[in-house]
């Protein structure tokens, strides 16, 4: 992605979607530490603290992983964060072993700030991230750790982005017991 892409919020404000930079530590820390427990319970790629923000910003040039952020134009506040990575979790590799190879595969993990969810930001940002994935030569994108079955807003987002539902699997949660999840994948058509 050479230039940041501009997305427009429902109220007309704009945000730039771009890869995370080394200088984003403070903004990313604010974003991480303001996520609610409800959001974190659906989204768990890593801890959400300053130490993690520092580590991730220091790794901003990692060729295997691009972390995209959406930055509000008016305040430089970060309102969205999406991981696109060729590092596939072991559990995901097992469930997707039928793919044979993960050479052209990336996985996606999106989160939008609580007060900004359900306003079309994830959909617009997801389109930018998937377009960037194509540019990187990625042929298919799966979900990092799948999607929890009752996460209807996320499932709707993925459907809108062209993902289709594949298998289902259960994970165990300390207080919530067995949780049903779905795997979803989008494959890019060759042009
Ligand atoms: C999932 C998430 C990334 C989606 O981003 P978003 O910006 O909120 O989503 P959007 O506003 O772009 O799109 C949401 C879609 O879901 C629809 N939707 C909202 N609530 C819904 C519900 N309860 N059931 C079904 N669809 C619903 C919206 O109407 C919209 O579809 P539409 O454009 O056709 O009207 C965001 O809500 C989030 O961060 N959630 C918490 C973390 C999370 O769940 N991450 C994904 C882990 S797999």
Image (cartoon, rainbow, N blue to C red):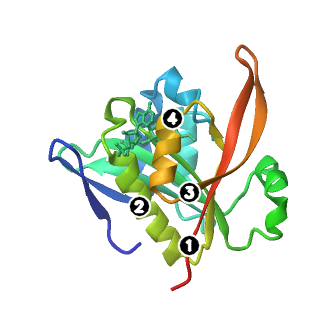
Left or right: 53 in relation to 4? right
Residues 57 and 12: in front is 12
- Number of marks drawn: 4
Residue 19 lies, in percent from the top left, at 43, 60
Pointer 4 or 2: first along the chain: 2
Residue 98 lies, in percent from the top left, at 83, 63
Pointer 2 or 1: first along the chain: 2
Left or right: 8 in relation to 81? left
Residue 108 lies, in percent from the top left, at 58, 54
Contact, CB < 8 Å: mark 4 with mark 2? no
* Location of mark 3 (residue): 163
* Location of mark 1 (residue): 188
Q: Is mark 4 within 8 Å of ligand 1?
A: yes
> If the picture is divided into quarters, which one holds ligand 1?
top left
Q: Which residue is drawn at 52% across and 21% down?
A: 37
Please say whether residue 178 is visible from this viewpoint. yes
Neighbours of disc 3 within 10 Å: few (<14), some (14-19), many (20+): many
Q: Which mark is residue 127?
A: 2
Contact, CB < 8 Å: mark 2 with mark 1? no
Q: Distance between the residues labelled 2 and 3?
A: 12 Å
Image position of 150 with respect to 144: above or below: above
* Location of mark 4 (residue): 152
């Amino acid at each position: 992605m050479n230039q940041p892409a501009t997305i427009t919020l429902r109220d007309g404000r704009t945000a730039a979607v771009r890869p995370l930079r080394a200088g984003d530590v403070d903004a990313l820390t604010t974003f991480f530490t303001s996520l609610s427990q409800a959001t974190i319970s659906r989204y768990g790629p890593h801890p959400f603290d300053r130490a993690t923000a520092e580590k991730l910003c220091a790794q901003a040039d990692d060729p295997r992983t691009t972390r995209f952020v959406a930055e509000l134009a008016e305040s430089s506040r970060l309102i969205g964060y999406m991981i696109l990575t060729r590092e596939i979790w072991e559990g995901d590799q097992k469930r997707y072993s039928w793919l044979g190879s993960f050479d052209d595969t990336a996985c996606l993990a999106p989160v939008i700030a609580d007060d900004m969810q359900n306003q079309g930001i994830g959909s617009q940002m997801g389109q930018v991230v998937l377009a960037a994935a194509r540019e990187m030569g990625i042929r298919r994108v799966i979900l990092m750790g799948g999607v929890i079955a009752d996460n209807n807003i996320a499932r709707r987002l993925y459907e809108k982005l062209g993902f289709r539902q594949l298998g289902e699997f259960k994970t165990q949660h300390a207080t919530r017991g067995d949780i049903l999840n779905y795997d979803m994948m989008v494959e890019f058509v060759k042009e």
